[in-house]
Amino acid sequence: ETLMHVCRLLSRAGILTTATVLTLFAPRASAFGSPGAVVRSCFGRVTARSKTQMAAMSPAEVTEAYTDLVSRLRKASHLDGIGGLLGWDQQTMMPQGAEEARAKQQAALAAVIHDAKTDPAIGALLKKLSAHASTLPPFDAANLRIASERFDQASRMSSALAAKQAELESRAYGAWTRARAESDWGAFAPTLAEVFDLQREICSTTKPNMAVYDAAIDIFDPKMTAPRIKEIFDQVKAELAPLISSIASKVEADPSLHEVPPALRGGPEWDTKKQDELCREIAAAIGFDFGKGRMDVSVHPFTGGSHTTDVRITTRYSEDNWVEGVAGTIHECGHAMYEQGRPAEQGDLPVSEALGMASHESQSLLWERMVGQSLPFWKWATPIFHKYFPHTKSCTPEDFYRAVNHVRPSLIRVDADEVTYPLHVILRFELEKGVLDGEVSVDELPALWDQKMKDYLGVVPPSAKEGVLQDVHWPSGAIGYFPSYTLGAMMANQIYDAAKGQIEGLEDKIAKGEFTELKDWLNKNIHSQGSLHASADDLLLAATGKRLEPKLFSTYLKEKYAKIYDLTL
């Protein structure tokens, strides 16, 4: 009887959940019959009574509670926006001497944001509204679902741990920048070990029912798991290896296939200021709204900012490789247009956010590869290049098209062609999973990296800068992000095919520089959906009629490059 009374009091007060009370008291309930029988019986009565009380809420009370929840969620989002600006400034404008101060600022802000996201009032509102989810409009119900998942996870993490994460990631970014410049792996390795250790702790704490690496992936791509990714990637490796081999054999027999017109080779005539002007014109033409965004230069191109009305992209330029500036700009514009197109009526709420990073990468890669590396695009863009770089006037759209579609194994992921790029991603997936699972040590990463580069791509980095130190993701704590790139490339192909099937004469329009219909289609079917759907598969099903089909991706690559290299596959 005492046990039953305690259970009733705890449950009515909302102090403990059913599962928690069962865990604490079930062992002592054995004297009353089967283990936990009395507790379960007690909770059944209390829960039924509680649900009856919640069900008694009037529509007006539900609206009032939801409005209160929305207000609190938006406050946390506004604080996140401030964090976004601090991060953007750190990678673009901040003086190097401010690293320590910025780390402390970000740590302090992270603690405040964490407290806002774990406000007990939010938990109470979510609990109150949970029985009414089915009565809410689709976006509101999705918002409630996402907010509940995030509150549960955030509540498992202390504000001190959140502050530690922000401080470490800021410090690690500075350490990585210096180590990369000097190609000094040893100087960065201890800090990276801290990052992996902390991420392992966070994943285990916030998502205890998931495998550690699954929890890391879930941060970036909800509902995706390591076993499914491995299955997809194994298929990709099997499909692409023969294609890469066939291309290499063809080029070995006829090196002229990789000859580039002298005008399209790197050199001082590719003035970086002119490249910037050209890239800004292209960005505006495809749909980036400079009235709600800006474009700068950084070591590693990225998209950031604080809001859908303040989206900030960066790219980088090189006289030796003009392609990276153009490709980087179009890629980041794809991200930015997703951000600028998110549902305004759900602004600053979880449901308004992009549905994971594979979905985000699908938009950047759709514009970069499906559009920017297509012949129709170069029929439009070639005269623009002639305008900014007169020395290219003898080059045709076909010359540009072939120049940006060479398949050649390379050391740097961001410079890789679309055929070999997935192997860069698979390498990183295997290594970060190994470290997070405890099967690989941080100290082993350089040697394993070099070996996998040799095995997968036939090239070996001459230095850490061109190898294990090349990416910003690990120092930034973005462990589990890399698979999103290749998953996103597959989604991009599938989404573009669907758009092409619904927009009459799409490629003819691209050749004329008419990008509005494509952007509007993406805005309607992808951007404005936010996180309404629970997974990328569900989004694809709604937009294309199919869940993710990896085979479509390999078929696209084979057909495209068989034509370029005159292959028989």
Image: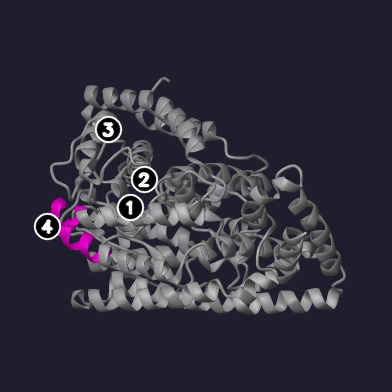
Q: Tell me, yes or no, whether the two marked residues, 3 and 4, touch with CB atoms within 8 Å.
A: no
Q: Where is residue 278, by image quadrant?
A: bottom left
Q: Earlier in the sequence, mark 3 or mark 1?
A: 1
Question: What is the CA distance from the residue labelled 1 to the residue labelled 4?
Answer: 22 Å
Q: Which residue is mark 2?
A: 436
The quadrant of the picture occupied by the C terminus is top left
Which residue was labeled with disc 3? 457
- Which of marks 2 and 4 precedes in the sequence? 4
Nearer to me, 173 or 328: 173
**SS state under label 3:** helix
C-alpha separation, residue under disc 3 versus residue under disc 2? 24 Å
Which class describes the residues within 10 Å of circle 4: few (<14), some (14-19), or many (20+)?
A: few
**Residue at left offset 36%, top offset 74%:** 107
Measured in 3D between alpha carbons, the distance from the residue under mark 2 to the one under mark 1, in whole angstroms, is 6 Å
The amino acid type of the residue labelled 4 equals Glu
Q: Mark 1 belongs to which amino acid?
A: Phe
Q: Is residue 180 magenta?
A: yes
**Where residue 388 appears, x then y in whole percent?**
29, 64
Q: Is residue 459 above or below residue 568?
A: below
Magenta span of residues: 173-189
**SS of the residue at dot 1?**
helix
- What residue is at 43 percent from the left and 44 percent from the top? 483
Whether label 2 touches label 1, CB < 8 Å: yes
Which residue lies under the disc numbered 1? 196
Residue at 66% from the left image edge and 44% from the top image edge: 541
Of the two numbered discs 3 and 2 in the rendering, the one whose residue sits closer to the viewer: 2
Residue 113 position in % (x across, y down): 48, 75
Q: Residues within 10 Å of mark 2 (few under 14, many from 20)?
A: many
Of circles 4 and 2, which is in front? 2
Marked residue nearer the N-terminal end (2 or 1): 1
